[in-house]
Amino acid sequence: MSLRVAERISGIQPFYVMELLRRAKELEAEGRDIIHMEIGEPDFMTPQTILKAAIAHTATGDVKYTPAAGLPELREKIAAFYRLRYGVTIPVSRIFVTPGATGAFLLALGASLNPGEEVLMADPCYPCNSNYVQLYDGKTRTIPVGADSHYQLTAGLIERHWSADTKGVLIASPSNPTGTMIPRDELKKAIATTERLGGCFYSDEIYHGLVYGETAATALEFSDEVFAINSFSKYFGMTGWRIGWLIVPEIFIEATEKLSQNIFISTSSDAQHAALAAFDDATLAELESRRLEFEKRRDFLYDALVRLGFEVPIKPEGAFYIYARCAKFTDDSFKFALDLLESEGVAVTPGKDFGTHEAHHALRFAYTTSLEKLADAAQRLERFINTR
């Protein structure tokens, strides 16, 4: 008998950016100054209000399991947040606190997806979403999208690509890597089309709050029969705490609770007590100042990239990424990113991490660093382009 890796792993792709990150760390160890624009992690620290709540809870020593669905008081605060921000009322029974958005995806798909069924997604999209489907022996059908649809799936695209095997649709708005949002009326149509076809609608809303114009619409404004995934990582600045939440249709409550009990037991007690302070007025005021800073960074980087000759058909409307076409400079964006790192110490993510549609002509720039560093990166990038 020989040991073998499970066959399902063969369909899970690595992060190509990790090769760049590994090399960036090596160069830093050698004393090189590296500007990191490759990883989607805010550079701001966890707000002090949240830290104080965590410290106070930990000091009690009462760090125990919580109910599988999460602390009742935290679920209540999430429900109140939806009433205040979106004007929608969500029963607390449909809200599950999860170990990050990843935990939310695993519960949503585990409760609804059967082996062999497929989920429709945009190309480009965040690669892990396809891998979650693969873990449940499902299939992903990625649909090429461009600026004409804000790099989002539309109701027409959903209907055109629907098949007998299709179980549902996943839309991320704001999107990683493009930073674009699906227009409110198009989101409503996409949900209605998916429901008419008998499918599940999964709404990735983890970048809500980090928007720079029109407020992002939650799928829950248009239907109670959707899965809404969110996180305390991006907007609330709690990446390392590994806490998120999932809102499920009522019919999936029991199944989701059983899965949560068996897979996770519960989300970290410390993280949940910390997150209780995430919705405090003082915290939200600090997060708003951070959002404004991200908007300044977006504006600066967008102008710099366009000036240098990169194509950015749609100025990002949310998140903290710019997905830029680099066809003017290269037919191999992965090699371009590697050479840029070696030559100028600027780390960015190649398009092949997000799909196959024109990926060789695309780079993702994360503006998760200071304006000063972004200005330095722009100068280095210009020097690199001019010496190629």
Image: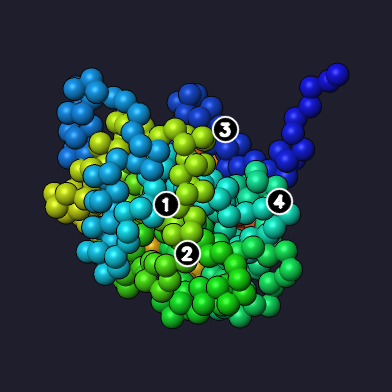
Q: Residues within 10 Å of mark 2 (few under 14, many from 20)?
A: many
Say which of marks 1 and 3 sits in front: 1
The type of residue carrying mark 2 is Val
Q: Front-most of 60 and 321?
A: 60
Q: Is tag 2's residue or tag 1's residue first in the polypeptide sequence? A: 2
Looking at the picture, how far across and down is residue 227, in whole percent?
47, 59
Query: In the figure, 209 relative to 144: above or below?
Result: above
| Marks 4 and 2, how far apart at CA | 20 Å
Task: Please indicate whether residue 69 sits to the left or right of residue 200 in the image.
Answer: left
Tell me which residue sits at (32%, 61%) in the image.
90
> Pointers 2 and 1 in contact (CB under 8 A)?
no
One can see residue 38 in this view:
no
> Pointers 1 and 4 in contact (CB under 8 A)?
no
State which quarter of the image contains the N terminus.
top right
Q: Is tag 4's residue or tag 3's residue first in the polypeptide sequence? A: 3
Q: Is tag 4's residue or tag 2's residue first in the polypeptide sequence? A: 4
| Marks 2 and 3, how far apart at CA | 41 Å
Looking at the picture, how far across and down is residue 74, in whole percent?
27, 45
Q: Is tag 1's residue or tag 4's residue first in the polypeptide sequence? A: 4
Q: Which residue is mark 1?
A: 246
Q: Which residue is mark 2?
A: 226
Q: Is tag 2's residue or tag 3's residue first in the polypeptide sequence? A: 3
| Marks 4 and 3, how far apart at CA | 38 Å
Looking at the picture, how far across and down is residue 259, in whole percent?
52, 41
The type of residue carrying mark 4 is Pro
Tell me which residue sits at (58%, 42%) in the image.
17
Tell me which residue sits at (65%, 43%) in the image.
135
| Marks 1 and 4, how far apart at CA | 22 Å
Q: Which residue is mark 3?
A: 23
Q: Which residue is mark 4?
A: 115
Q: Residues within 10 Å of mark 3 (few under 14, many from 20)?
A: some
Q: Secondary structure at mark 3?
A: helix
